[in-house]
Image (cartoon, rainbow, N blue to C red):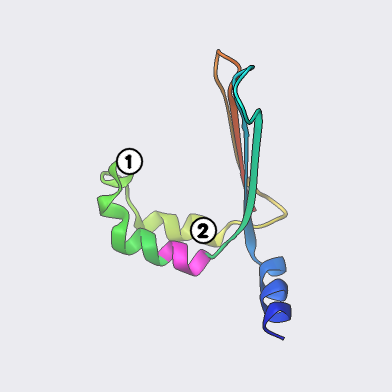
Amino acid sequence: VFILAISFQSSRSVWVHLRIQQKPGETPQRIALSLPMPISLTRWALSNFGHKIPGLRDQPVDQYSEILDGLSAEEPFYIHVDDDDGESVEIFIG
């Protein structure tokens, strides 16, 4: 019953998909991770520890709650970065 409840909850939650393509010749060539993202836990962590994260020190962390509430599978948040040497990182949140 516990596994059934967790699988039902994770199917309705927002997921984070991370895809990394490394430089030619490096192993592993591709790395792929997909995990459910607990929005309430993420919101709590940003509000309590956001000032300790170097890239977020000068950012208005209060606005991140609005961004987190707007995430959905219908309109995912997407980041794609290509490097000149062949590395590529893709992040889907939704």
Q: Residue furthest bottom?
A: 1
Membership of 74 in magenta stretch: no
The kind of residue tagged 1 is Gly
> Is 21 or 49 nearer to us in this picture?
21
> Is 1 or 69 nearer to us in this picture?
1
Is disc 2 placed on a helix, strand or loop?
Answer: helix
Q: Residue at x 43, y 55 (%)?
A: 64
Q: Residues within 10 Å of mark 2 (few under 14, many from 20)?
A: some
Residue 89 on image: x %, y %:
58, 32
Q: Residue at x 40, y 55 (%)?
A: 63
27 versus 36 height, above or below: above
The residue at which mark 1 appears reads as 55
Q: Residue at x 72, y 75 (%)?
A: 8
The kind of residue tagged 2 is Leu
Which mark is nearer the camera, 2 or 1? Answer: 1
* Quadrant where the N terminus is found in the figure: bottom right
Residue 68 on image: x %, y %:
51, 58
Look at the magenta stretch and give its main secondary structure.
helix
Q: Earlier in the sequence, mark 2 or mark 1?
A: 1
| Mark-to-mark CA distance, 2 and 1 | 18 Å
> Is 70 or 4 nearer to us in this picture?
4
Residue 90 on image: x %, y %:
61, 35
Q: Residue furthest top?
A: 84
57 versus 2 height, above or below: above
Is disc 1 placed on a helix, strand or loop?
Answer: helix
Q: Residues within 10 Å of mark 1 (few under 14, many from 20)?
A: few
Membership of 41 in magenta stretch: yes
Point out the stretch of residues depicted in magenta: 39-43
The residue at which mark 2 appears reads as 68
